[in-house]
Amino acid sequence: MRPTDPTPLAPIPLAAIEAARERIAGLALRTPLVRLDAPEAPAEIWLKLENLQPIGSFKLRGAGNAIAAAAPGALAGGVVTASAGNMAQGVAWAARERGVACTVAMPESAPATKRAAVERLGGRIVAMPYDAWWRAIETGRCPGVDGAFVHPVADAAVIAGNGTIGLEVLEDLPDADTVLVPYGGGGLSCGIASAVRALRPAARVVACEVDTAAPLAASLAAGEPRAVERIPSFVDGIGGKSLLPAMWPLARGLLAGSLVIPLAEVAAAIRLLAERARVVAEGAGAVAVAAALSGRAGGGKIVCVVSGGNIDAAPLARILAGGLPEAPR
Amino acid sequence: MTARVGRPDLESIRLAAAGLRGIVVHTPLVAYRGDGGSEDGRGAGVWLKPEVHQPVGSFKLRGVFHAVAALPAAAREAGVATVSAGNTAQALAWSARHFGVPARSLMPDTAPQTKIDAVRALGGEPVLVPAAELFRFLRERGWESEPYAFIHPWTSGDLITGHATLGLEVLDDLPEVETVYVPVGGGGLLAGVGSAIRQIAPSVRLVAVEPEGCPSLHAALDAGKPVTVPCSTICDGVAVPFVTDEMFPLLTKLVDDSVLVPERAVRAAVRSLALANKIVAEPSGALALAAALATPASERGASVCLVTGGSIDRDLLVEILSDDAA
């Protein structure tokens, strides 16, 4: 809960992930791992349904662990985070459960539905220019706003909370060959990979990005962090223009590459998930499934982390009808 | 006179649950988060049991698999058959594939294409007939002249025992539950779940839920005996115009209340399940939630809604998602 250390993060020890699981039991759901009915697929595909979490995404795990792990005194002034999306809801939910005040820094351009979702959970919103907001994420500080800062990604406690997904996956499918994880900030994939490396080193954890913005793939190819051009799309949960510097060494060390998925395949995966798995996934939540279906991830037993399902009715209807939603402005 | 359907005992239900481990998913209980629940997203005491996460997309696999597994091997080898609006046929085809035997299902020719295709994809053989002929087959015990082992979709004792495992899970996961909302078509689910719950937690209220457009149990309870009602509803999974004589006595004994849901409320519940809880439910799968939301929280207390299945035609789902008024 300290401001994020600018020095690179280390892999999360298994003990920290196991402790996180104890802390978030009862707060986050132990989501089911279900087999995808896709006989035509090149692999045996399993789905870890994090979209079923109470806030519609996995973010409750990391936020819950960070807040539960904090010393009681550290939270007297409330908590603060910077997020325009799912993490904002995760921190607000976990703060409410702990009975502490929550403030969320959001870019002024954040859509009304995302603001309303945080306010419904009792969170206070501070709107700021996009650049100031991004600086808060980069530095782990939110000047002028009181409270302990919970970093949306690069916080060891947040990553440990995300890692609990890895524990559950290997309990349910001990012989998994590959785990595919959407890569946004890297906190989800690195958390899961920390757990998998400790428990089943033979399994690969592979990042998945969308071709409208794939900074990890570009950075891995270059051997150093690279910025990319970012084309806005309906896939709003992943795909930034650059990596968070603190995450780079961790991602490079833990992840067995990044698969870059065309936007249309992500939409097709959302359709398939609705029809064959009877769940709603947002773009980021479907990207791993698209990767598995494409054959890019190989064969064997593949677990796809369906990270979230927060998509509005209109773009969802458009995708289910066979189209592609327009990009947000 | 046909034999009445009896109540499966707890030991059989627990054995069935053990036999189904690794086959069916122990589905999670999740708090309902949409409109009509509480503003804070805590669910106002409404919990969902999303059976859409079962391998064939509905709870039917519980009872059907258990019934197929319970057949003597020789009888099973000859093949298995049922009558179904779609979900039971899928469960039968899935189970038959598991055992490597053929499966045939009589289905109404009005069944959604999604369900017909799904049966075929699993290697089952759908036989499409007009709904009237299908119900006549059931009434006149047409299966007695069939070569395949017939699994009755509502009254098979083993099927009901398999369905009852759902009740065990509800009580394991939410011991403080006060009301359970159960959609009713032929009544097999209610017979199973109700039997489990009555034996373990007799004070839990059991509410039977049907669409206004096909109120066969409701009308039978009113009349004190089975009657045939006209059926017109988007809830294809429960569009059964009568409760059988064999089933009626058990259902009467189990049910505390019977609720009818208007079509509009079903559509709103389908939409809400998709957007708030990320669950794709077919109309009959959304009935229980629609009924709970129509009841004041003070009357129902902590409530579990069985979200029974998710085989919905894509066009209908798109239409419901595109309709802001739903």
Image (cartoon, rainbow, N blue to C red):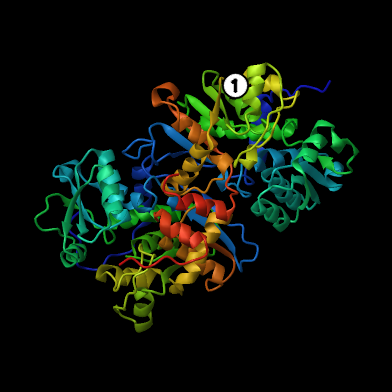
Which of these two is toward me, B195 or B311?
Answer: B311
Task: Name the residue furthest left.
Answer: A144
Q: Is residue B295 left or right of residue B95?
A: left
Report x, y in % for residue A24: 35, 44
Q: Quadrant of the C terminus of chain A?
A: bottom left
Secondary structure at numbered mark 1: loop
Task: Name the residue furthest bottom.
Answer: A222
Report x, y in % for residue A146: 11, 50
Q: Is residue B20 left or right of residue A279?
A: right
Task: Tell me if residue B318 can be seen.
Answer: yes
Number of numbered tags placed on the structure image: 1
* Quarter location, residue B80: top right
Q: Work out whether A158 lies above or below B232.
A: below
- Residue located 39% across and 50% down the image: A56
Task: Name the residue furthest top.
Answer: B224
List the residue tagged with mark 1. B255
Q: Is residue A44 left or right of residue A117?
A: right
Q: Amino acid at mark 1?
A: Val
Q: Is residue A283 left or right of residue B281?
A: left
Chain letter, disc 1 residue = B
* Quarter location, residue A311: bottom left
Task: Tell me if residue A308 can be seen.
Answer: no
Report x, y in % for residue B243: 70, 27
